[in-house]
Amino acid sequence: MQETAVKWNLLETGPVVEAEIFSSEEAFLKFKNYGTPESFARVKLLVDTGSNISGLDHSIIKMLNLFSYNDSEEWVQGQGGSWQVLRYSCVLYLPIFKKKALTFDVLGGHFNGSAYDGVIGRDVLQFCEFKYDGVKNAFSLVAKGF
């Protein structure tokens, strides 16, 4: 049976899911399998079908001391223009993944003052089925092929 995350209040926050971010696969496995105290962050992430890569607030990146691939920034384009950002490696756990997690890249960003700590882009959504039901003011997210 597949677990589905169904959330309400799209008009207030948009499609936001709760997740956990770990600095490495080892940290995730130690915490989930043995309950050892590992550093991780419980976050709220906006599902962003327009983004090809996920993003995370700099405060979370700093707190977890995430690994940056290099010191040179890369250009990204968004609704408000172009920015230079760093790419980081981390591990994402969503309850719909059950006992698994996804190692993926995130771009550093500034999400302070918003209802979420980052965005889930199509790099993660390729492993999910996302349904947005505006009439019911709800959405669902289901893990697929994961």
Image (cartoon, rainbow, N blue to C red):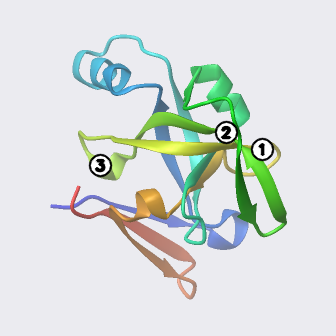
Crowd rating for badge 3 (residues with CA inside 10 Å; few <14, some 14–19, many 20+): some
Residue 124 lies in quadrant: bottom left
Q: In whole angstroms, how far apart are the C-alphas of marks 1 and 2?
A: 12 Å
Q: Name the residue under label 2.
A: 86
Q: Mark 1 points at which residue?
A: 110
Q: Name which of mark 1 and mark 2 comes first in the sequence.
A: 2
Badges 1 and 3: C-beta atoms under 8 Å apart?
Answer: no
Residue type pointed to by label 2: Leu
Residue 92 lies in quadrant: top left
Q: Residue at x 15, y 61 (%)?
A: 1
Q: Name which of mark 1 and mark 3 comes first in the sequence.
A: 3
Crowd rating for badge 1 (residues with CA inside 10 Å; few <14, some 14–19, many 20+): few
In the image, residue 46 sits, relative to residue 100, either above or below, namely below
Q: In whole angstroms, how far apart are the C-alphas of marks 3 and 2?
A: 27 Å
The location of residue 94, given as percent across then percent down, is 39, 46
In the image, residue 48 sits, relative to residue 108, either above or below, namely below
Taking depth in this image into account, of 75 and 95 the one nearest to the observer is: 75
Residue type pointed to by label 3: Phe
Left or right, residue 26 beside residue 107: left
Q: Name which of mark 3 and mark 2 comes first in the sequence.
A: 2
Farthest-out residue, bottom: 135
Left or right, residue 115 beside residue 50: right
Left or right, residue 121 beside residue 2: right
Secondary structure, mark 2, is loop
Secondary structure, mark 1, is loop
> Which quarter of the figure is the C terminus placed in?
bottom left
* Residue mark closest to the camera, 1 vs 2: 2
* Residue mark closest to the camera, 3 vs 2: 2
Q: Name the residue under label 3.
A: 97
The location of residue 135, given as percent across then percent down, is 56, 88
Residue type pointed to by label 1: His
The location of residue 64, given as percent across then percent down, is 57, 22
